[in-house]
Every structure is written in C-alpha cells, then in structure tokens.
Amino acid sequence: MSGHVMISYQWDSQERAVYIRDKLREHGYKVWFDLDDMKGDIVDAMADAVQNSAVVLMCMSERYKESSNCRSEAQYAHKLKRPIIPLLMEEGYDPDGWLGFILGTKLYYKFCCDTETDVDGLLKGIKTLKIGK
C-alpha cells in the first residue's frame, strides 16, 4: 500500500500529535501533518490528504468530536474506506455520536498516558497494514 500516514487531530492535542509525527518519521514513514503540509485552500488540502493517505490516525477527544474540520476528515476517510487507526488523546473519554460510529469496534491506542509505550503499539499496528515507507 502506498501513500502517507495522515494525522487528524484537534489543536488541543497538537503537542502529542507532533511527537507521534516525529516518531513515525524516525521510523521511515511519510507523514502528512497540517503544520507541514497544509497549503492553499484548507478543504482542498484536507481532502487531498485523506485521498492520498494509506492510513488515517484519528486522534480522539471531546474537542476532536466537536471540531467540524476533524469530523470532515474522519468521515471522508471512512467514506473512502481508508484504514483508520484511532488514538485516544483524552483520559476517560468514551467516543459517542458520529465519532463512536466511525470508531465502531476498532482497536485504539492510548496517547493520554504513557506515550512511548503507545508509539510502540502504534508502529506495530501500522506495520500490520503493510504500508510502504
């Protein structure tokens, strides 16, 4: 599978999202990240990012659920049947509504506690998808 790893997150989770981006890049993955790659029209850039992704990392929190841009990215990834790996960014958060629907029964990784351990699990999860580097 070719394409990049797209990180979809809400700005309150930016510090952890940057950490995840850096770790993935250290392991040779091409990562689409808004701070680096957002150019031109925001909606066009987000759509292109999802369309050209091999997997979308969905950084879940209450604020993520409330963000219209995050919702658009997640729903478009779901519509295009892109693999979605959910990352829990808020301790005790239980996704419901549209976010709970997209999450379904997917395995998620916790990024609200021990980040290093979670990165190891995430890397294994991405590796199972056989995404090219």
Image (tube, rainbow, N blue to C red):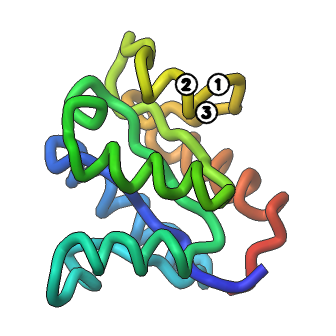
x%, y% of residue 84? 61, 50
Q: Are marks 2 and 1 in contact (CB under 8 Å)?
A: yes
Q: Please tell me the numbered disc located at residue 26.
A: none
Q: Secondary structure at mark 1?
A: loop
User: Residue at 48% across / 69% down in the picture?
Assistant: 50
Look at the image and tell me in which quarter the C terminus lies. bottom right
Residue picked out by circle 3: 108
Q: Nearer the viewer, mark 2 or mark 3?
A: 2
Residue 83 lies in what quarter of the image? bottom right
Q: Are marks 1 and 3 in contact (CB under 8 Å)?
A: no
Residue type (three-letter) at the residue carrying disc 3: Tyr
The mark that comes first in sequence, 2 or 3, is 2
Look at the image and tell me in which quarter the N terminus lies. bottom right
* Relative to 8, residue 85 above or below: above
User: Residue at 21% across / 44% down in the picture?
Assistant: 68
Residue picked out by circle 2: 101
Residue picked out by circle 1: 104
* Relative to 107, residue 67 above or below: below
Q: Measure the C-alpha gap from mark 1 to mark 3.
A: 10 Å
